[in-house]
Amino acid sequence: MFEGLSQKFQDVFRRLRGEGKITAEDLAAALKQIRLALLEGDVHFRVVKEFLARVEARALGEKVLEGLNPAQQVIAIVREEMVATLGGEDASELKVDGAPAVILLCGLQGSGKTTTTGKLAKRLAARGRYPLLVAADLQRAAAVEQLVQVGRRVDVPVLTPQPGEAVVDVARRSLRVARETGRDVVIVDSAGRLHVDEALMAEIAAVAEAVSPQEILYVADAMTGQDAVRSAQEFGRVLPLTGVLLTKLDGDTRGGAALSVREVTRVPIRYAGVGEKPEELELFSPARMASRILGMGDVLGLIEKAQQAVDAKEAERLADRLSRNEFSLEDLRDQLRTMRRMGPLKGVLESLPRVGPLKGLGELGEVDDKRLVRTAAIIDSMTPAERRNPTVLNAGRKRRIARGSGTTVPEINQLLKQYLQMKKMMKGLKGGWMRKAFRR
């Protein structure tokens, strides 16, 4: 996520740190590079212009340019203004009160709207609500069946249209069914199109008028850049949007939609879809998102995931071993298995900052979750002594391990190289951060 944009920001910051004192010329050159990075990331040109104007106005102050650490102050300003562009404050859960409360999801076809409907239902159910999903997409083939499958996956009932029933009638009937069955939240999955058209807008406006939703969320595909922003503007022209829900943030996202949609539509980003699983829907945090875009990671978010996936006693044991620089191949295997429980490994690594002891992460190569299985097989094929002290592995031992694990000697060599790199990074981290994380 945001890999290209993050790398460009890191390049700019690296050059700033190399300057003993930042002059107005240095700042102008940095802002030029930031502008190019944002435009290449498909950020709306007006958002880029306003963002850079705010950064320049703050950074050109005498206090900054003559400060003891001007580079860090400029970087801090860039981050603060990016947080402001993304919305400033962290999003809060939807306030759904009513008998029943209605949430209407809108957006273009292919934005992940139907899948997101199920994710939102699961999140509400975890808060003690009783949602009902409504299949109001009668335009796309198999859309109703897809929502039924989604509802089955999250254990939430789905109201489907009767033969010949119009979309508005389905929406109206959902309110009656919800009252009769004790469902206190109705989530309407509306129809999407490949592009905005008058028929779509008329239909979605009629549905909204029929059910009077408390929340109208625009579902935006984060991978579509400014297209998502333009579509959101069109939906906002017809509907009183209350928020945006970004999907596919775990994909190859350039950053344009995330950085543009809030500033252009003037409605907050409420949630972010960070994976395909039903539980992978998070409240949107501008501060964390800005840190990830700038290559500073999202350690708080990673800690929250780790607290759900890691046993506290196991974390304490690993922290003790890290403090004694005893990180073994067995520890590596156990930690990789833990990471798999935290979601795709690529997403976990993206949450770590590319600075300090973690700056070497970019040298570890492409990370494939399937390789974790092969890695575990290699380590399991070693003797306990070899896992504790891999320096004893000679050519003969490696051939034996390769036969036992169904891998090759080059794969074993690559694993050992990555292990040594990770051990070096772990030595820099020690173990204090892990103890603090699991004692919160």
Image: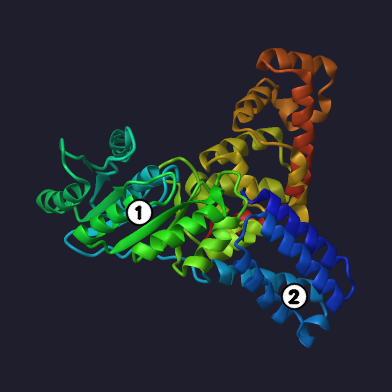
Asked whether residue 242 is in view, the answer is: no
Which amino acid lies under the numbered mark 1 shown in the image of this protein?
Answer: Glu
> Quick one: label 1, few (<14), some, or many (20+) residues within 10 Å?
few
Query: Looking at the rendered structure, which numbered label has been put on residue 20?
Result: none
Callout 2, which amino acid? Answer: Gln
- Looking at the image, which residue is at 79% across and 62% down? 12
x and y percent of residue 390 in the render? 78, 29
Q: Nearer the viewer, residue 200 or 216?
A: 200
Q: Residue furthest bottom?
A: 62
Of tags 2 and 1, the one toward the viewer is 1
Place of residue 359 in the rendered image (x, y in percent of width and height, measured from the top left): 76, 51
Q: Nearer the viewer, residue 427 or 211?
A: 211
Q: Seen in the image, is 271 located left or right of residue 142?
A: right
Q: Which residue is mark 2?
A: 73
Q: Which mark is residue 198?
A: 1
Residue sitting at the far front: 198
Residue 73 is at least partly visible in this image: yes
- Helix, strand, or loop for circle 2? helix
Q: Is residue 25 above or below residue 327?
A: below
Residue 405 horizontal/vertical position (percent): 66, 17
Horizontal side of 292 relative to 10 (left or right) equals left
Quadrant location of residue 433?
Answer: bottom right
Q: Nearer the viewer, residue 225 or 413?
A: 225
Q: Nearer the viewer, residue 231 or 320?
A: 231
From the viewer's perspective, is residue 72 above or below residue 215?
Answer: below
